[in-house]
Amino acid sequence: MTIQDIQTVQELLATPKKIAIIPHRGPDGDAMGSTLALYHFLLKQNHQPIVIAPNEFPDFLAWLPGSETVKIYEKDKDNCTAILKDAELVFTLDFNAFHRTGEMETVLEQLTVPFIMIDHHQKPDDYATIMYSDTQFGSTCEMIYNFISFLDQKASLDKTIATCIYTGILTDSGSFRFPKTTGNTHRIVAELIDLGVENTVIPTQLFDNSSYDRLQLLGRALQNMKVIAEKQTSYITLTQAELNEFHFVKGDTEGIVNYGLSIKGIVFSAIFIENQEEKIIKISFRSQGNFDVNEFARNHFNGGGHINAAGGKSEESLSATVAKFEELVHQLNV
């Protein structure tokens, strides 16, 4: 952020305001961690913030402080629309294009109040008054820490805000394993732990909180895994019938795509999940090294994200989508 940007934000926040805070559809740990960290920070600054998520967030994030206050647009469209239209300022966190909010897109496009974007994805759309967008960061939560620091408000950081920030950094860094985890990331985490973050408890709440059905679904996913050894690629499929068999709930497939990368020699992994309700195939891509799954997702599957982590979708059948993927993979120079 430039000095002028910081001054503009300080002016916008100088008097109490009604503020809407928006994560992307299908919010993950970084989206919920960053929005709730900002929510608690703005409360301490005497504002009236409300987090409005486009749809439900996973149950394994429901312990986050303040999660019970989050409004779900899909469950209460009229009320959430009224809140958005009444807002004097809108923050969009962990995404950079309105279409990432699903049905909320139309409402957001109609708003005339200032927008502040805080995000670490590539190719941001030009809708925000203030755009703190930087792909060098591994998480939006790390940027929220910086944002609070830029405003000279580090004294406002407490255990609650720190817990939310830590959660997003931990999840989006792959438990500090991904390439964008820097020395500065660890220095920030050290400060958060000094503020009281329970760093030995949070991983258990996030990763060791599975249902029996979820583990059975994971087992089926691993059975379905295919490997294209000559292209250092693996992929997993899950049909709607398989999701139903194991009583799928939101969040159950989180992280399954990463198992492909645990195979020796594999650098590109994908998962294809059938969603009959939306009539699409939801896709996640992961890679190691220099293979750019963001470019792959953008070029072929109406998606995008980061170099090593991206998402996409297909409106073709599961079998047709997988056939297209296999054909593309055989053309790659992985």
Image (cartoon, helix red, strand yellow):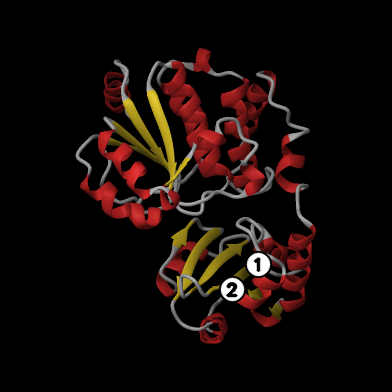
Give neighbour class at mark 1: few <14, some 14-19, many 20+ (Cα, 10 Å).
many
Indicate left or right for 284 with 113 as reference. right
The answer to whether residue 87 shows anywhere in this view is yes
Say if 6 sits above or below 303 in the image: above
Q: Which residue is mark 2?
A: 334
Q: Is residue 248 above or below residue 160?
A: below
Question: Residue drawn 19% across and 39% down?
Answer: 112
Nearer the observer, 176 or 301: 301
Residue under pointer 1: 267
Q: Residue furthest top?
A: 155
The residue drawn where x is 32% and y is 37% is 83
Tag 2 near tag 1, CB within 8 Å: yes
Q: Position of residue 326 (x, y in %)?
A: 57, 84
Residue 239 seen from this side: no
Label 2 crowd bin: few (<14), some (14–19), many (20+), radius 10 Å: some
Q: Quadrant of the C terminus?
A: bottom right
Q: From the viewer's perspective, tell me whether residue 67 is left or right of residue 117.
A: right
* Relative to 152, residue 310 above or below: below
Give how far across and how far down residue 309 sits, in percent: 55, 58
**Image quarter for residue 123?**
bottom left
Amino acid at dot 2: Val
The x and y percentages for residue 325 are 54, 80
Q: Residue at x 56, y 61 (%)?
A: 290
Q: Is residue 39 left or right of residue 264?
A: left
Q: Which mark is residue 184?
A: none
| 214 left or right of 68 in image | right
Element under disc 2? loop
Residue 3 coordinates in the image, percent (x, y): 31, 23
